[in-house]
């Protein structure tokens, strides 16, 4: 049963984070849970990240620092950091995130209360580029269900709602089963992985703000470039995401009836997203047409 003697790994993948990394590291080292390792995976940084990390590691033997000689990609670095970790429990964090001092211990307590859990999320505060901080409270219970399709359907529902409510990729996980889940580098991979986690086992949730994340607002083409995936995926991201989910259903150990039910949930999600995409494109085309008419009218005026 998880307790004060459980080793928890915090995996921190980074690339060129020298200007923001130290606060994240300090928040991990300040946890009130003592058995902790901080795994920093440096993705061939070209700034002062290496020097900072080696200095921090020299001052605390809980820090494990690894530097890749060449860029292994954003997803590749996340996956590697988890595989390098040795704790029974794992939590990823970004290089400009912060954890409350009780984040690890409160998450472990939830695991101790329910041995079925594969993942425990917490409430998170998010700050956008304008400096506005917001959070949301998840109040559902279906992610704790023993039925994998009920959990899967709930996660798909949450993907169409605000990201403020729940963020499984930055929860605490049982490391071994999570590392065993294969991941494919693609747009919306984080959402696909969240759905795979929902199929893997029940989740718990701590309704307290125990972490802080800074969020970026990026166009999908820029995200594709950062991930190193073909630009054309930006035009087919919904389709590719749903196809990958459908493929995974056959690998998730489900019964035939569960596969059928889960497939129906994916198709419902796809239909909702396609309707939303078409509505957005229709409004955009209408605005462009209106602008064209206005410009033509102005050009005819004396």
Image (spheres, grey):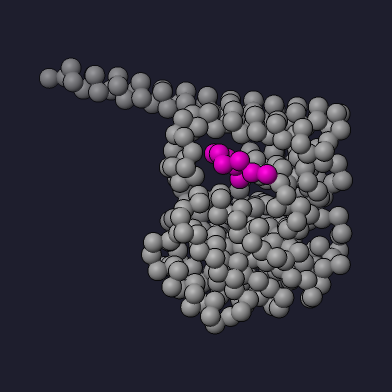
The number of numbered discs placed on residues in the rendered structure image is 0
293 versus 185 height, above or below: above
- At x 41% / y 23%, what residue is drawn? 285
Could you tell me residue 83's position as x and y percent? 66, 58
- At x 50% / y 59%, what residue is drawn? 68
117 versus 226 height, above or below: below
Quarter of the N terminus within the rendering: bottom right
Quadrant in which residue 193 is drawn: top right
Quarter of the C terminus within the rendering: top left
Could you tell me residue 211's position as x and y percent? 62, 64
- At x 61% / y 45%, what residue is drawn? 190
19 versus 231 height, above or below: below
Classify residue 231 as left or right of residue 176: left
Quadrant in which residue 49 is drawn: bottom left
Q: Residue furthest front?
A: 69
Could you tell me residue 37's position as x and y percent? 65, 71
- At x 70% / y 65%, what residue is drawn? 86
Residue 99 seen in the figure: no
Q: Which residue lies furthest to the bottom in this view?
A: 59
Magenta part of the chain: 182-190
The verdict on residue 9 being magenta is no
198 versus 77 height, above or below: above
Task: Name the residue nearer the viewer: 191 or 61.
Answer: 61
Q: Main secondary structure of the magenta part?
A: loop
The verdict on residue 186 being magenta is yes
């Amino acid at each position: 049963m998880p307790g004060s003697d459980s080793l928890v790994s915090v995996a921190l993948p980074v690339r060129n984070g020298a200007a923001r990394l130290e606060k994240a590291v300090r928040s991990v080292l300040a946890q009130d849970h003592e058995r902790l390792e901080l795994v920093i995976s440096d993705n061939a940084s070209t700034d002062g990240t290496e020097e900072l990390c080696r200095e921090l590691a020299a001052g605390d033997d809980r820090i494990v620092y690894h530097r890749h000689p060449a860029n292994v990609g954003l997803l590749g670095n996340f996956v590697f950091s988890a595989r390098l970790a040795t704790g029974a429990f794992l939590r990823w964090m970004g290089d400009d995130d912060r954890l409350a001092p009780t984040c690890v211990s409160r998450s472990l307590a939830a695991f101790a209360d329910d041995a079925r859990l594969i993942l425990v999320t917490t409430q998170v505060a998010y700050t956008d580029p304008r400096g506005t901080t917001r959070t949301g409270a998840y109040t559902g219970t279906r992610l704790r269900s023993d039925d994998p399709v009920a959990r899967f359907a709930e996660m798909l529902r949450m993907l169409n709602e605000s990201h403020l409510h729940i963020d499984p990729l930055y929860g605490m996980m049982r490391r071994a089963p999570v590392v065993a889940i294969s991941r494919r580098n693609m747009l919306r991979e984080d959402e696909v992985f969240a759905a795979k986690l929902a199929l893997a086992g029940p989740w718990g949730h701590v309704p307290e703000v125990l972490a802080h994340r800074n969020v970026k607002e990026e166009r999908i083409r820029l995200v594709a470039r950062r991930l190193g995936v073909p630009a054309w995926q930006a035009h087919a991201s919904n389709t590719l995401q749903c196809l990958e989910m459908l493929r995974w259903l056959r690998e998730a150990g489900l019964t035939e009836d569960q596969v059928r039910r889960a497939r129906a949930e994916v198709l419902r999600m796809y239909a909702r997203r396609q309707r939303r995409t078409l509505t957005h494109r229709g409004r955009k085309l209408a605005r462009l047409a209106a602008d064209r008419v206005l410009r033509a009218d102005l050009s005819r005026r004396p």
